[in-house]
Image (tube, rainbow, N blue to C red):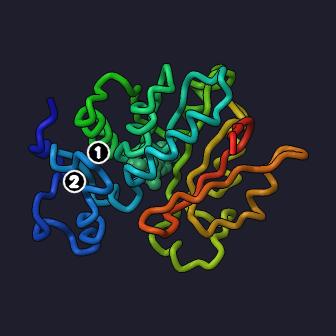
């Protein structure tokens, strides 16, 4: 049973009132119940994790689409940049996967993610791996591509991305589109990328299979796009 008590680790918090919250995070904290419907049950966050978290309604919608569209023989999903657990929790809750793996390089953020999954009743439903996803995927998952899809919500280089009319995916920091796609595609072509809403679609079009459309979905909250997902590989959708 999870508690709201923060652990004895510097940098992990469960903020309960606005005067505890650093100014730059307050806008996210005010949306905490939308980001995590179970926030008050003791969600843990690092200050950085607030900037990258996928809000729960968006994470659930993505999980539904991934579950519907993924090739039937795929039984495991690898969340390469797990953060504080937003997407990994939704993938586990979808019930579609025999295995959900979640990789995160920052040990404090990973500690939050594990705890947050526990709050959602998912203790032992997600296989957590601390490390660099490029190393981990190459070393541990190279032979599992036939049964795996990879979900990637990489960092976008900080909040500055919002001012770009068209977001250039080849200069995305710290990893460009190419730097993410190339190593992951050696394991499986079935890759979902969660990217800024203004991402340059021409740069994505280059990854479309011959004579096939590429599915790009905007995920919206309160009438505005939060982000988009591009579904690469053999995803098939009814509509
Ligand atoms: C945008 S956040 C992911 C948020 C996550 N989808 C969620 O809903 O909580 C990106 C995360 O990737 C992690 N990260 C960055 N580089 C990484 C790498 N090479 N391997 C694994 N994790 C990495 C960062 O520490 C950060 O927590």
Considering only order in the chain, which callout, 2 or 1, is on the residue closer to the N terminus?
Answer: 2
Q: Where in the figure is residue 104, as x and y percent of width and height?
A: 42, 41
Determine whether label 1 and label 2 are within 8 Å by CB. Answer: yes
Q: Which quadrant would the C terminus be assigned to in this image?
A: top right
Name the residue: 67% across, 46% down. 231
Name the residue: 54% across, 30% down. 77
Q: Is mark 1 on a helix, strand or loop?
A: helix
Q: In this view, does 142 lie above or below 116?
A: above
- Using the image as rendered, state which of residue 38 and residue 23 is in the foreground: 38
Disc 2 residue crowd, few under 14, some 14–19, many 20+, Cα 10 Å = some
Q: Is residue 227 left or right of residue 179?
A: left
Q: In which quarter of the image is residue 24?
A: bottom left
Q: In this view, does 214 lie to the left or right of 166?
A: right
Mark 2, residue position: 11
Q: Quadrant of residue 7?
A: top left
Which disc number belongs to residue 157?
none
Q: Is residue 172 above or below residue 81?
A: below
Q: Is residue 95 above or below residue 41?
A: above
Mark 1, residue position: 108
Q: Where in the figure is residue 116, as x and y percent of width and height?
A: 27, 40
Q: In this view, does 201 lie to the left or right of 7?
A: right
Q: Where in the figure is residue 187, as x and y percent of width and height?
A: 68, 30
Q: Where in the figure is residue 89, as x and y percent of width and height?
A: 38, 37
């Amino acid at each position: 049973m999870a508690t709201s008590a923060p652990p004895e680790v510097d940098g992990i918090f469960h903020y309960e009132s606005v005067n505890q919250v650093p100014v730059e995070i307050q806008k996210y904290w005010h949306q905490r119940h939308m980001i995590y419907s179970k926030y008050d049950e003791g969600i843990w966050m690092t200050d950085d994790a607030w900037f990258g978290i996928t809000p729960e309604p968006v994470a659930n919608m993505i999980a539904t689409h991934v579950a519907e569209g993924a090739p039937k023989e795929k039984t495991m999903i690898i969340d390469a940049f797990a953060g504080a657990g937003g997407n990994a929790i939704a993938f586990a809750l979808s019930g579609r996967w025999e295995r959900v793996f979640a990789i995160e390089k920052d040990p404090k953020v990973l500690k939050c993610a594990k705890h947050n999954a526990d709050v959602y009743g998912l203790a032992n439903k997600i296989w957590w791996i601390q490390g660099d996803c490029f190393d981990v995927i190459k070393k541990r998952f190279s032979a599992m591509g036939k049964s795996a899809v990879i979900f990637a919500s990489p960092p976008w280089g900080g909040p500055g991305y919002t001012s770009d009319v068209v977001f250039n995916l080849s200069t995305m920091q710290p990893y460009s589109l190419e730097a993410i796609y190339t190593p992951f595609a050696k394991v499986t072509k079935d890759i979902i990328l969660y990217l800024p809403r203004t991402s340059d679609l021409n740069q994505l079009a280059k990854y479309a299979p011959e004579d096939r459309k590429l599915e790009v979905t905007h995920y919206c909250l309160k009438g505005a796009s939060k982000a988009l997902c591009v579904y690469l590989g053999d995803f098939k959708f009814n509509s």
